[in-house]
Image (cartoon, rainbow, N blue to C red):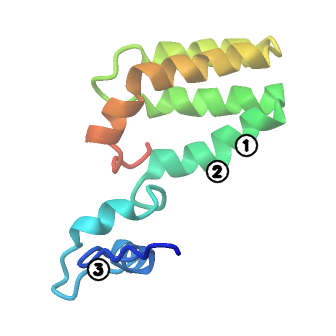
Amino acid sequence: MGAVIVLLGLPSCADRRDAATEPAQSGQASSSATLAPAIGPDFPLQTWMKGTAARTLASGTPEALVAVFERIERIDPPGYDGWKAIASQGAAAARASNVDGCRVACKACHDQYRQRYRDTDRRRPLR
């Protein structure tokens, strides 16, 4: 015979979803708000990266990749020394039709800046 385990006081999956997607009645976000998807208008760079840059990279179209890396160069947030140089390397790889080189540039930028950008600048509007 199987045992039944009852966990009292723990929210169900449905409770977590509701808490993550709906603000608390007081108008303040609940502590479960971190369960909400981390994409949307409040995260402009991430929205653009997933909607444009990642799709363009997946397409492997060199001309479109040049435009993506040139756009990333223009974003160049203050205090991110090397951002523009990495984007320039990606653009150069795209001009040479080197999609693997584009991926290397993406990885270099993500390895160097992604966590810091998420922690401090993710709501920064794109310029």
| Quadrant of the frame with the C terminus | top left
Provide the secondary structure element on which disc 3 rests: loop
Secondary structure state at the residue bearing disc 2? helix
Please tell me which residue lies in front, 38 or 109: 38
Q: In what element is the residue under mark 1?
A: helix
- CB under 8 Å between discs 2 and 1: yes
Lower position in the chain sequence, tag 3 or tag 1: 3
Q: Callout 1, which amino acid?
A: Arg
What is the number of the mark on residue 23?
3
Q: Which residue position is annotated with label 1?
A: 55
- The Cα atoms of the two marked residues, 2 and 1, are separated by 6 Å
Identify the amino acid type marked 2.
Gly
Mark 3 surroundings within 10 Å by alpha-carbon count, few (fewer than 14), some (14 through 19), many (20 or more): some
Disc on the earlier residue, 3 or 2? 3
Give the CA separation, mark 3 to mark 1: 32 Å
Q: Are marks 3 and 2 in contact (CB under 8 Å)?
A: no
Q: Residue 9 versus residue 87: which sits nearer the camera?
A: 9
Q: Amino acid at mark 3?
A: Pro
Instruction: Look at discs 3 and 2 and give the one toward the viewer.
Output: 3
Badge 2 crowding class, 10 Å Cα cut-off, few under 14, some 14 to 19, many 20 or more, is few
Q: Residue furthest left?
A: 26
Residue 63 lies, in percent from the top left, at 80, 28
| Residue under the image location 41 percent in, 19 percent down | 112
Q: Tell me if residue 16 comes above or below residue 66 in the rendering.
A: below
Viewer-nearest of discs 3 and 1: 3
Q: Please identify the quarter of the rendering in which residue 78 is found.
A: top left
Residue occupying the point 46% across, 61% down:
37
What is the distance, in whole Å, between disc 3 and disc 2 at their CAs?
Answer: 26 Å
Q: Which residue is mark 2?
A: 51
Give the quarter of the image for residue 5: bottom left
In the picture, measured across the screen, residue 107 lies left or right of residue 78, that is right
Q: Which mark is residue 63?
A: none
